[in-house]
Amino acid sequence: MRPFAYERVPDPAAAQRAVPVGSSSAAAPVPTMVLAGGTTLLDLMKLDVLRPERLLDIRPLESRLGAIRLDGQGLRLGALARMAQVADDVEVRREFPVLAESLALAASAQLRNMATLGGNVLQRTRCSYYRDVSYAACNKRNPGSGCAALDGYNRLHAVLGTSEHCIASYPGDFAQALMALDAVVEIEGPQGGRSMPFAELHRAPGDRPDIETTLRPGELITAFQVPAGPWAKRSRYVKVRDRQSYAFAAASAAVALDLDGDRVRGVRIALGGVATRPWRATDAEAALAGQRLDEASAMRAAEVAFRDARTHGENDDKPELGRRTLVRALLEAQRMEIA
Amino acid sequence: MPEGMIGQGIGASPVRVDGRAKVTGAAHYASDMAVPNPAWAFLVTSAIARGRVTAIDETEARRVPGVLDILHHGNMRGEVQEAGFFAGGGYAGSSLRPLEDDRVHHDGEIVAVVLAESYETAREAAYRLQVRYAEEQPSAGFDTEGAEARDAKDAVQGHEDAEVGDADAAFAAAPVKIEAAYETPTQHHNPIELFTTTASWENGRLTILEGSQYVHGLRNGVAKQLGLDPSLVRVESPFIGGAFGSRGSLTQRTALIAVAARRLNRPVKLVATRDQGFTIATYRAETRQRVKLAANPDGTLVAFVHEGTEVSSRPDPYKVAGTQTTARMYACPNIRTKVTILHADRNTPGFMRSPPEVPYMFGLESAMDELAHALGMDPIELRRVNDSTHESVKGLPWTSRGLMRCFDAGAEAFGWKDRTPQPRSMRDGDWLVGYGCASTIYPTHLGAATARVTLTPDGRARVQTAAHEIGTGTYTVVAQAAAEGLGLPLEKVLVEMGSSELPPSPVSGGSNVTASVCAVVMKACEEIRARIAAAAGQGPLQGRDPATLRLAEGSLRAPDGAAEPLTEAMARASNGAIEVYAENIPHGLPEGALKSLYQGKPALGAGLEGKDRVMAAFGAEFVEVRVHSRTAETRVARILGAFAAGRIVNPRTARSQLMGGLIWGIGSALHEATEMDRKRARYVNDNIAEYLIPVNADVPKLDVLVLEEEDKATPLGIKGLGELGNVGTNAAIANAVFHATGKRIRTLPIRIESLL
Ligand SMILES: Cc1cc2nc3c(=O)[nH]c(=O)nc-3n(C[C@H](O)[C@H](O)[C@H](O)COP(=O)(O)OP(=O)(O)OC[C@H]3O[C@@H](n4cnc5c(N)ncnc54)[C@H](O)[C@@H]3O)c2cc1C
Ligand code: SF4
């Protein structure tokens, strides 16, 4: 870790004006980064991967940005709400199970108590080469330096949305749930407030893996809006991982189903652990629409979802695992008993 | 009978004497111990596995305020002498001399040490130090070019490959046989206490504070590296936050920190990082094995071939060689074993909980299950028909062998009869269910040991021996031995351990300590008893034969019930304290064992090395696994171990060890592996977020049965059990996975993709 200046946002009123957050670039030296739970940021600072000169602690804004609000329109989750708080919320669990499940299955109890929703969706990849500065080649950390994972250890790396510059997988869980429910992200910045579909927040690596989001310099995520809908209650998060708890997804699927008997009126699918960014499987959704949901149609949809998968040796089995995970999630969502 | 005296000797289950200190934080681990005004060290380790350091640019690092010095090969050459590889009669886990030249021998080798006023400053400067390399293509070992294979019998001093009869001919002619290849991964101990060292000098005397499984070894080794008389080096290691073998032999860091402290003329403290721990200490070597097993239709074995190749470093032939155990496990007339060392650009591996048995018993016990399947026989029955009172290599008798008693008791408690033999025949909803079992064994190693026991006039005892509390409960069991020997309640016994200033005790490895140290403590207590008994002539015990007098319940007692309070009986024997220093050389160890002990050489014997008998603890492990029928995650639903390990000194701590062993075994079978970038020969998951071990959710129902066993071969009948629990688990789980899925997984750990 290198020396940095630490400041706290003075009081909730201060958040009325824009907070300078820093850029969305993981690598370019940024003068300031906001600190929420710190469970991603401080780790990466200790590892010398992130080197902010100034940390702005936004936790004093919790009273304004930490609330969970449910009404007829849907759910509004403040960006500073803690993972545990949302995972344990009775109404969220009943009305939007996929959100609560994705959070409850993430990280550990201690981390969930500390970490915020805003920080969660912006967590960084677990690619070992990104996290260890002794490797010279990592385009995400050091643009233009190459990618050690391509011919290195890539068992947990992505198979969807990759580029020749980066194959790091997006590690989080909650983002898939938000994406499957068509959430909208609210943002405040130097130019005032704006909002956009959550699906537009993350970027695929392309030739600039260091630019991970579409946030502009100085912008702060303030909330997530999750619209109500017939699919929300029949929604499920299946996370397949190497141990029973406290592990990142080898593959995961967030699905939300609107059924008419055994026919699919509408389905939303987002995939985790397999892609470079939270991944919406729209073609798979289209393949299922109007179909009877059963083993065969679920498998066909899964085939479509991984049609473009590209593997790199140690992750050759990922597409198969991803397909099976999706089938499992669809069939489990179908079996859910909805009150 | 006074309060607190019931059930505190050998065989009782008192709570740990240091338990309270540990949970309240009063127990100070080596790096918690205060030293005045320390400087801090931060290691810089190599970013390549093979090549040279071409330049070290200190400019930016030196600019960080508070930096005191930077050590590297340019200013350290010649400072640290060789301490020798332990297996070649030296002290160190690696024969490399730290910071001796510009060569890089493996990933994460120490290339510089930054010294500063604070930990944070040292770390920042270390990050700013520019080290440049000329990289050469390294070999990671298996599947890469450039590794050098050597037969262990040529590479390793004293290694012999066990061979009996003509195994290949017998195999060729046998009616039922299997042949298979097994692989076990690199694993790292990852004790929660990081690798730390604090060094300080006073008047030419060096004090080292460092968690160590062998303080006398550390003292002598560092003395040799620094050209000091060992009497000038003191090592303190009062508590250890886990070791599992990783703190058994000297590492390169200790001498560097000692030199740093001498140069700065002030104490220096190092707390290495988690990832550095993967490369500055040892680890479990990766193995690949071939097993051939052949039997008659009734299951009796006719041939067994076990060949293993093990990855080591370039300079050092660390051998795992679990064939020494597998060759002796079952009755078999024809055996051939062979061990090959594969030298690669890796750090030197070393001991890790049940070093030879964990990888090699995975091979044998998986193969036994494969053979049972080929024979259409229950796997327990296969073991029964091949059970034996004698080992098969030299025909020596087992001092006792509880293997089948463990299988029978375990099978009963586990409900083995509910298993339907056909693979893939049991199911619970979406989950495939499988039962598996395997044998476990751990040789009873014993070492020469010394101890001093002092009984003071107020009826309290002090036991001094340089044994180590690696978390297993050694303070407690040693106190129990003295409580037993002197007939005192536990709270009147004070145990001092973990210091090189105390009478030497063996390395805390090979599960020998309880047996070795309790034996010598009991010997000292017996001498104290004899002295008190000899002086009992004028008191209430007048006329009794001193040999029949016992120390019990705070008094000296005769068989007829007459007694005299200990303090009074003692006053007849001495005007002050009675202090006895005792030495013990267990049966089968050479006379020179004590000398080796004083020189800090880890000389253990007995176990399978006996000339007239062999001694081991045995057990049987049972597992129920569930494998998801679609996504193939394997989870252990329940696990049960039944063990026969001689006399149990403390059933409570014994149970903890066996439980911990089984849990470790779950991790070893399903989670643990140090992942390599094979092209760069570097470890990639070098942190405990990515190096997975079981979490609570992975350990559901767990049962430990400890069977009574009387082994008369040694005076106390104690067998070690710290490394017994995790030996059979790998195979028991793999066998259960086969039963659940019909797929035989021969590569550990068993992962989702193994079963897709
Ligand atoms: C061992 C371990 C295991 C884990 N396992 C999982 C897992 O299984 N699944 C999972 O999903 N996650 C997992 N995580 C990740 C964890 O969930 C994230 O670290 C956490 O959610 C981040 O939230 P935070 O509030 O601590 O963020 P911080 O660390 O404070 O911030 C993270 C990033 O977001 C930025 N930021 C934070 N808040 C805002 C905001 N409101 N607006 C704009 N920028 C912001 C920060 O500047 C920083 O760049 C794991 C983490 C660890 C350490
Ligand atoms: S996959 Fe991406 S993050 Fe990982 S090394 Fe390559 S560029 Fe860096």
Image (tube, rainbow, N blue to C red):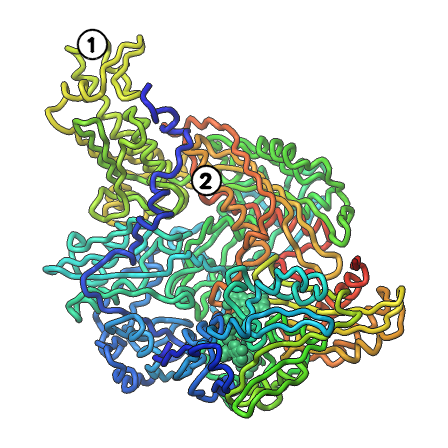
Amino acid tagged 2: Leu
Residue position for label 2:
B721
Residue drawn at (42%, 54%) of the image: B351
| Disc 1 from disc 2: Cα separation | 43 Å
Most extreme residue toward the bottom is A191
Are callouts 1 and 2 both on one chain? yes
Q: Identify the subunit bearing mark 2.
A: B
Q: Where residue A298 sits in the image (x, y, percent)?
A: 82, 68
Compared across the picture, whether A312 is left or right of B629 comes to left
Q: Foreground residue, B693 or B602?
A: B693
Q: Residues within 10 Å of mark 1 (few under 14, many from 20)?
A: some
Q: Is residue B406 above or below residue A123?
A: above
Q: Is residue B80 above or below residue B566?
A: below
Which disc is residue B699 wearing?
A: none
Residue drawn at (29%, 73%) of the image: B113
Compared across the picture, whether A16 is left or right of A264 comes to left
Secondary structure under the numbered disc 2 in the rendered image: loop
Q: Is residue B78 above or below residue B199?
A: below
Q: Identify the subunit bearing mark 1.
A: B
Residue position for label 1:
B540
Amino acid tagged 1: Pro
Q: Is mark 1 within 8 Å of ligand 1?
A: no
Secondary structure under the numbered disc 1 in the rendered image: loop
Tag 1 and tag 2, C-beta contact below 8 Å: no
